[in-house]
Image (cartoon, rainbow, N blue to C red):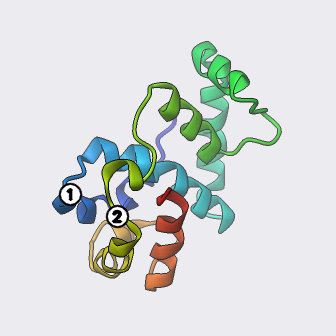
Amino acid sequence: MPSIEIDRVLIRDQLGPLGVGHGETSCILLPAVCKYNAAKGANVERQKAVIEALWRESESARVFKDKGLSKESADLGDLLDAIIRALPMLRTLEDVKVGRDKLDILAQNSLHDRWVQSNPVPLTKKEQVMEKLQMVVE
């Protein structure tokens, strides 16, 4: 499967001290990060390659069809969300007991994290991180 280096931008280092494990942060944040980056026109070709690879896998394709997703309209965030939910893994900050009251400090601290700086879309403002967090709070 093609490599897609967006997982590192997941604000996960900031969630660890709140008791959220690395794997859980990826399940919660990766679909939102993919959607955010695609909406900004970043790493679109890489995401398309991963989408194609996922649809070629028969088990993944079955999950997508069961969730009502189609090749024509589902983006990588949608596909990852379907797979993660089918496992079943945690998908929201609420699932790991991180409430809205923590979002502001998470966003602010994330701006100082070296991995956030590697996002294909430069993250320089708290509002950009908040946009991603808002996508996964509930």
Name the residue tied to disc 1: 16
Disc 1 packing (10 Å; few <14; some 14–19; many ≥20): few
Helix, strand or loop status at disc 1: helix
The quarter holding residue 97 reads bottom left
> Which residue is painted at 59% across and 63% down in the image?
36
> Which residue is painted at 26% across and 60% down in the image?
15
Q: CA distance from mark 1 to mark 2?
A: 9 Å
Farthest residue, direction bottom: 125
> Which residue is painted at 66% across and 21% down in the image?
61
- Does 59 sit above or below residue 104? above
Work out whether residue 126 can be spotted. yes
- Does 50 sit above or below residue 29? above
Farthest residue, direction right: 72
> Which residue is painted at 79% across and 32% down in the image?
70
Q: Position of residue 53 (x, y in %)?
A: 61, 28
Q: Position of residue 91 (x, y in %)?
A: 45, 44
- Does 72 sit above or below residue 127? above
Q: Position of residue 127 (x, y in %)?
A: 50, 82
What amino acid type is highlighted by mark number 2?
Ile
Name the residue tied to disc 2: 11
Q: Position of residue 47 (x, y in %)?
A: 61, 46
Work out whether residue 5 can be spotted. no
Residue 2 as seen in the image, left or right of residue 109 = right
